[in-house]
Structures are given as C-alpha cells and as structure tokens.
Image: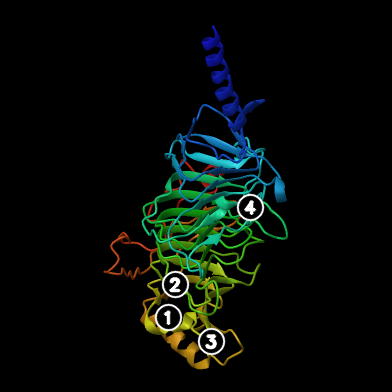
Amino acid sequence: MKHNGLILFLVLLVVAGSCRKTKFSTEGDFTVIRDQGFGIGDRYLRASESYLIEDLVFVNDGQTLTIEAGTVIRFKAGQADQASALIVARGGKIIAKGSPDHPIIFTAEADDLHGSVPLHTQGLWGGLMILGSAPVNTPSGEAQIEGIVLSEPRGWFGGANEADNSGVLEYVSIRHAGTNIGQGNEINGLTLGGVGNQTSIHHVEVISSLDDGVEFFGGTVNTRHLAVAFCGDDAFDIDLGYQGVGQFWLAVQAQASGDRLIEVDGNSVDYPIQQPLSVPVISNATLIGNRGNTGVQLISFDNNAAGIISNSIMVNEDNGILIEYSGFRPSSFDHFSTGRLQLVANTFFQVNADETDKIFRVRGISGESVAEQQEMLSDYFLTAANQLADPGFILDSQQLQLIPGNSFMHQLWFDPENPIVEKVNYSGAFEDYYWLEGWTMLDAAGILVYP
C-alpha cells in the first residue's frame, strides 16, 4: 500500500506539473490558447474546434504546430501589452497546409466569417510572425523582431543557414491584423524574419492589416501567389538583406490609406556596408495603387538596395519607381549602374503623368543634382522593354477586374540563371483565371469580376 500511495503521489505530481504548463482551456465556444512561457508545444489544431489565441503565443525552438485544413484561429482583441499574435520562434515550425476548398484562416475574435467585420477593418489583433535562422545583414548577423520586447529571447532571428526550414504556409488567409503595440509600432499581417529557402510559402492572403501586409526581414525564402489588399502601410516591405524570389504577387491599396506597394531597403546601417544586400527577384506582380490619395510611389529602392522586377503590371499610382542616389556613399543607383538593380519588361498605366521619362525617378538623398542620373534612368525605361499600355482593369470599391481585359504586347524577360522563376507567357499575376478563388476573403467578398 505504501508503494501504491507513492506511485499515486508521483502520478498526481506529473499531472499537476502538466496542468501548470497547459495552454489550452475552454471558454464558451472557444478553446483558448495562452502561452505561459513554455510555448504551444507539439500541437495539432483541428478544423472541428474553434480556437482563440490570447496574448502572444510562441511555437518554441523544437516544437511543431500543425494546423488542419479548414481550421479557423481567432485572436483576442487588444493593443500594447494586451495584443495577441502567433510567433513561430527560431527553431520552431508551423505546418499550415490548407486547400482551395478548406483554407486556414487567422482572424479577429469578432469575425463570424459572414460579414460581422467589414472587409476594410484594420488592426483588430497582432499578426503571424515566423522567425528563422537564415542570414540577415545586421552587424551581429541576428536581430530582434519588431513588436517583441528585447527581454524575450524567443524574439530573435537570423543565422547562417540559408536552407532554414520553418515549415509550411499554404492556402492561408490572414485578416484584420496589425494592432498597435505601443508608440506607433504595429505588427505586420505576416512577418518573415530570417526565414530560409526550405520553408514553403504559397497561396497566402493578407487582408486589411493596419501595418504592412508582408514584411521580409532578411532571409532567403521563396514565395508564390501572395495577395495583399487594403493595408495601412506598405503592401510588401523588404529589409535586412532579403534574397529570395517572389512570383505571382498581388497588391491592392485601399482608397484612402496605404504607403508603397513594394518598399525595398538594403542595409540596416550605413557604415560599414553589411552583407548580404537586399536583392529580391520579383516576377509577375500586379500592383494596384490609389492614385490621387497618398502621393507616394509604387516602389522605392533605398539604403543601398538592389533587386529585379520583371513581367509585372503596375497601375493607378501618383508616382512610379524611385531609386535613391548618393554622391558620397553606396546607394541603390549604384546597383542600377552595375546591373544588380533591373526593371525589365513591365507594363505601366495611369502612373504619374503616363510619360516614360517620369515613371522611373532618381532621388538625391542629400540634395545632390541628379540630372545625369535621371537621364540614364529615363532612357532605360524603353531599352529595358518597359511600356505604357492599358491592361483594361476595373478598379472601384465594388468591383476588381484584375485579369487584363485589353490585348496588349507582352514583352517578357526571364533571367536564364534563375531557374526558380516559372516561365509563363503573360504579364502580371493572372492570365485568365483567379488563383484567389475559393480560399480568400477577396473572393468571398464578391468583388472579383472577369473581363
């Protein structure tokens, strides 16, 4: 009996310890997930359950969070230290494999998926962050992700592993994120910090984030079929030496908010020059601005950034593509001069004054004269097979026709040394159908129309 009593005591002790570490509880219709410092653990979230994440929940180093197709995960409303978000820490993994018929949805607590939260509502919860061990160009080779306090060790990312694998995001919709966590600092809809090229990310939607839609902080991850719409800041933000491929990207600005469609920044500091540089390769993007409302650029290259943008359609914005120039330090224009920054075979319509010499612009960061540089860039517009042409889109608050309705010449360009970019025979993100159908809020809103 004494031995049985001892065994019973030990069992109860283990159970009690497990209870102290558990993050799952039931409140009303929800299974509530909280992080008590131990991360979420190796968990499988099922489509048959209703989940609510409260505060910041981490997938710790060595843990794997698997999410079944069709699962809806909601996030508690709140700002500052009450903000809720899901963070996959460096060394953790998320396996979120939805399907066109059964997407995985991350959204606000108040969202019943049937119109309780209007399409353009921003900033109701934090966002999804994935942190990996691929290179970033800070002096130490690591960085602390925005939105996480410095005292939290699980907020660090970066390393030397270009082939880092942080898991899978497929057919995932992220809605109404970007809450303010203090002093004007918002979390992005999807944040990718030092994520490596063995991570699979495709068919991901970010709708109505108060901050950026998708932000890349370094890393090497390749992405396809990303849709960002109605965000408060940039649609795509690239920083800290990101070197990956993006193909079939869609960005649509809200009518009265939003900054750049794509912002590319190179170095985190001016001196010394840090490696790697930001050199994104972006093909077949469709970028829709909000002409007359913000006065900003379609795309900017700043802080010694390079990159290639090709085979894309860009419309309806006050300004085109801006490239910084400096007479006293390395700048993005230097990469244009050497061929590391290329803008090839793109189509523009209703951008600036619809004049070829005004769509690509140079900016002297210290007031330098840029007349010579501007002439070079203006001549380049046509020699690099860029063109002015009306794709025949319909763009208003009730309808978005993003498949070209007009026939126009498609001059395409593919880098023979980059096998990752798929060779297709059309410009922009769509040919004759919407890969958004069935799984996105854009499709559910009923605003996508065909020519």
Q: Split into 4 quadrants, where in the image is the C terminus?
A: bottom left
Q: Earlier in the sequence, mark 1 or mark 2?
A: 2
Q: Is residue 254 left or right of residue 238?
A: right
Instruction: Give the answer, above or below, for where 391 lies relative to 340.
Output: above
Q: Which type of secondary structure does the marked residue at label 3 adopt? A: loop
**C-alpha gap between disc 1 and disc 2:** 10 Å
Residue 199 at x, y percent in the picture: 40, 51
Q: Which residue is mark 3?
A: 326
Q: Is residue 313 left or right of residue 15?
A: left
Q: Earlier in the sequence, mark 4 or mark 3?
A: 4
Q: Which residue is mark 1?
A: 335
Q: Earlier in the sequence, mark 2 or mark 3?
A: 2
* Mark 1 or mark 2, whichever is nearer to me: 2
Q: Are marks 1 and 3 in contact (CB under 8 Å)?
A: no
Q: Are marks 1 and 2 in contact (CB under 8 Å)?
A: yes
Look at label 3 and name its amino acid: Ser
Judge by depth and name the residue closer to the eye, 288 or 366: 366
Query: Residue sitting at 58 percent across and 23 percent down?
Result: 13
**C-alpha gap between disc 1 and disc 3:** 12 Å
Look at label 2 and name its amino acid: Leu
Q: Earlier in the sequence, mark 1 or mark 3?
A: 3
Q: Which mark is residue 277?
A: 2
Residue 194 at x, y percent in the picture: 47, 58
Look at label 4 and name its amino acid: Gly
Q: Residues within 10 Å of mark 1 (few under 14, many from 20)?
A: some
Residue 244 at x, y percent in the picture: 40, 62
Q: Which type of secondary structure does the marked residue at label 4 adopt? A: loop
Q: Which residue is mark 4?
A: 178
